């Protein structure tokens, strides 16, 4: 009896369920908004926060598609409800014998075409940005191995190379970086500089993927693929190999650290002595 008296009135099962759902949504939104950029977060519902021009355009295009899909779903739902209530046997005992409606047929041809045009224009804009070839401020060669990444920097910044392996155990805990996404050595690039990446593989196919940069590019043995990015925010960004490349595919993370120009100069000065030097510098192909 005491339990019944203490229960709030006017709030049944559905009311409590709605309250729990609202609480979960608000809690999730708070967790996602409070999380840092460059890595996934628990209960994440959205894309990672973009930090490059390409990623921003992809992010905006993604949300545009969501709004278009929502409008189409609501429109079709409205039509279904109207048909159910207006054309059922009880309210419409004598069904229409109409077989053609020219205006309706024109409408259901023109409207999808307009929707596709609305999707195509921003899609082509994203492709144009991705395929543009601006002059590089820094070139880095990325090589996929089974199962780690190696990075080669050109002679003008020191001419060195290093491997980046998964950081595990106590080393990962001490680093404060996310599990299965941290590496013992990070690829370091300066902020607000155009960086071109030339990607290949030494054994099997891999894929260098960085969600916050809006890029995923295959690393293929005997072939050199290239893309560019300009990170507009300092920080540490995480990605993974996204090509099913073998036994330890899930343990092949990518870590990119974006720093100021001064910090980058200091890092390259240290890296010249810390990492292996490349005689004659790394070999880079001409951009096409």
Image: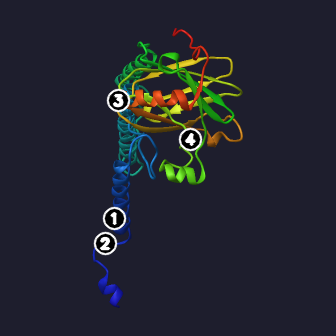
How far, Cα to Cα, is label 2 from label 4?
A: 54 Å
Q: Specify whether residue 214 is in view.
A: no
Upstream in sequence: badge 1 or badge 4 = 1
Q: Are marks 2 and 4 in contact (CB under 8 Å)?
A: no
Look at the numbered disc 4 and give the secondary structure of its residue: loop
Crowd band around label 1 with a 10 angstrom C-alpha radius: few (<14), some (14–19), many (20+): few
Q: For mark 3, what is the residue?
A: 232
Q: Are marks 3 and 1 in contact (CB under 8 Å)?
A: no
Q: Residue drawn 42% across and 49% down? A: 89
Crowd band around label 2 with a 10 angstrom C-alpha radius: few (<14), some (14–19), many (20+): few
Q: Specify whether residue 147 is in view.
A: yes
How far, Cα to Cα, is label 1 from label 2?
A: 10 Å
Q: Residue drawn 35% across and 25% down? A: 192
Q: Which of pointers 3 and 1 indicates the residue nearer the eye?
A: 3
Q: For mark 4, what is the residue?
A: 184
Upstream in sequence: badge 1 or badge 2 = 2
Crowd band around label 3 with a 10 angstrom C-alpha radius: few (<14), some (14–19), many (20+): some
Upstream in sequence: badge 4 or badge 3 = 4
Q: For mark 2, what is the residue?
A: 11
Upstream in sequence: badge 3 or badge 1 = 1
Estimate the x, y position of residue 237 in percent, counting from the top left. Answer: 45, 38
Upstream in sequence: badge 2 or badge 4 = 2
* Color scheme of the displayed model: rainbow
Upstream in sequence: badge 3 or badge 2 = 2
Residue in front for this viewpoint, 24 or 163: 163
How far, Cα to Cα, is label 1 from label 4?
A: 44 Å
Q: Residue drawn 36% across and 56% down? A: 25
Estimate the x, y position of residue 254 in percent, counting from the top left. Answer: 54, 36
Q: Are marks 3 and 2 in contact (CB under 8 Å)?
A: no
Marker disc for residue 19: 1
Q: Which of pointers 3 and 2 indicates the residue nearer the eye?
A: 3
Q: Are marks 1 and 2 in contact (CB under 8 Å)?
A: yes
């Amino acid at each position: 009896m005491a339990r019944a008296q203490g229960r709030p009135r006017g709030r049944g099962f559905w009311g409590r369920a709605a309250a729990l759902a609202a609480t979960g949504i608000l809690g999730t939104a708070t967790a996602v908004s409070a999380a840092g950029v460059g890595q996934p977060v628990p209960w994440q519902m959205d894309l990672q926060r973009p930090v490059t021009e390409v990623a921003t355009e992809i992010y905006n295009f993604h949300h545009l598609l969501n709004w278009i899909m929502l409008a189409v779903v609501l429109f079709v739902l409205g039509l279904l409800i109207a048909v159910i209530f207006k054309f059922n046997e009880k309210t419409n005992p004598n069904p229409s014998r109409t077989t053609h409606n020219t205006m309706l047929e024109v409408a259901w041809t023109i409207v999808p075409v307009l929707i596709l045009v609305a999707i195509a224009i921003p899609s082509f804009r994203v492709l144009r940005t991705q395929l543009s070839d601006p002059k590089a401020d820094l070139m880095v060669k990325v090589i996929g191995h089974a199962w780690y990444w190696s990075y080669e920097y050109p002679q003008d910044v020191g001419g060195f190379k290093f491997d980046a392996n998964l950081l595990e155990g106590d080393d990962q805990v001490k680093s404060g970086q996310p599990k299965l996404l941290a590496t013992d050595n990070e690829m370091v690039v300066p902020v607000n500089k155009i960086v071109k990446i030339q990607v290949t593989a030494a054994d099997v196919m891999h894929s260098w993927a960085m969600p916050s940069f809006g890029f995923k590019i295959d690393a293929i043995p005997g072939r050199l693929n290239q893309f560019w990015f300009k990170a507009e925010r300092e920080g540490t960004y995480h990605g993974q190999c996204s090509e099913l490349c073998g036994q330890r595919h899930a343990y092949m993370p990518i870590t990119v650290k974006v720093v100021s120009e001064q910090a980058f100069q200091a890092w390259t000065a240290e890296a010249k002595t810390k990492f292996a030097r490349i005689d004659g510098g790394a070999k880079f192909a001409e951009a096409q």
